Image (spheres, rainbow, N blue to C red):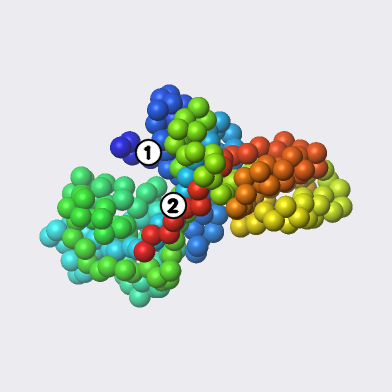
Amino acid sequence: MICCATFEEVFENIKQDPTIIGMMAIENTIAGSLLHNYELLRDSGTSVVGEHKLHISHCICCMPDDDWNTVTEIHSHPVALMQCRGFLSRHPEMKAVENEDTAGSAKEIFENRRHGHAAICSAAAAEMYGMKILENHIEDNKHNFTRFLVVCDPRKADFLRPIEKTDKSSLVFSLPHEEGSLSQVLSILSFYKINMTKIQSLPIIGREWEYMFYVDVTYDNLTRYRQSIDAITPLTKELKILGEYINGRQSD
């Protein structure tokens, strides 16, 4: 297992070693989409071959000899801090400090023996780094899930997921700046009984008021799905299939 400090590093590792399989967060049920990751995925040259929806639960942990009376700072990723706003508001005496990673915050505190500092991370990360859990399940919403995409070198895609077993696809495309261009595409998908589960638009830098559309669709017939792609291709610009895969499971 290779731990990456940034999402960019995930794709760099795959580029350097095509045998590597990466995982990247793409959206959260509370914080929403990780917009920059859509652009990273589009430009990476990798293929999406799977997904997993992970249940997110946070704890607050500290050095083994610290406790509630000694903790003055709480470190974590900005999204995790946002997901625990209720807990933080009940502890105004503790300063919230943004960090690049949840588990990395616990690791940094433990390795540098930072007494008085706590981390918000998963219970598994706290235990891995020998931290003391002060309180578990501190997230505001107990129905908090993050969707992860499994990505790899395109040459490995067919070995990792047989195309005939796929039932979900991620696409990206732009459209002519014309009235009704998006509704035409959506109508065709509907005609072929392709279910759109997600649409995310991002502005195209340097082309005012034009957007890239990132779309997830599910299907129960591969042939009909392929026909729908053939039908919408002439209506779009720069259409790219980011990956075809099996609809992911949701952890408890």
The x, y position of residue 171, in whole percent, is 64, 44
The x, y position of residue 184, in whole percent, is 81, 52
228 displayed left or right of 75:
right
Say few, some or many: other residues with alpha carbon within 10 Å of mark 2 (under 14 / 14 to 19 / 20 or more): some
Task: Tell me the number on the disc at residue 45.
Answer: none
The x, y position of residue 14, in whole percent, is 44, 30
Question: What amino acid type is highlighted by mark number 1?
Answer: Cys
For the N terminus, the quadrant is top left
> Which one is in front, 216 or 168?
168
236 displayed left or right of 194:
right
Q: Is residue 157 visible?
A: yes
For the C terminus, the quadrant is bottom left
> Which one is in front, 72 or 204?
204
29 displayed left or right of 110:
right
Looking at the image, which residue is at 52% across and 30% down? 154
Looking at the image, which residue is at 54% across and 59% down? 32
Question: What amino acid type is highlighted by mark number 2?
Answer: His
Looking at the image, which residue is at 67% across and 54% down? 194
Closer to the eye: label 1 or 2 = 2
Task: Tell me the number on the disc at residue 4.
Answer: 1
First-in-chain label (1 vs 2): 1
> Which one is in front, 82 or 221?
221
> Which one is in front, 217 or 111?
217
Looking at the image, which residue is at 36% across and 71% down? 87
Q: Is residue 182 visible?
A: no
- Circle 2 sits in a helix, a strand or a loop, which is it? strand
- Circle 1 sits in a helix, a strand or a loop, which is it? loop
State the separation of the CA atoms marked 1 and 2.
Answer: 18 Å
Single out the residue that lies furthest toward the left. 65
Total numbered labels: 2
The residue singled out by tag 2 in the image is: 52
> Which image quadrant for residue 186?
bottom right
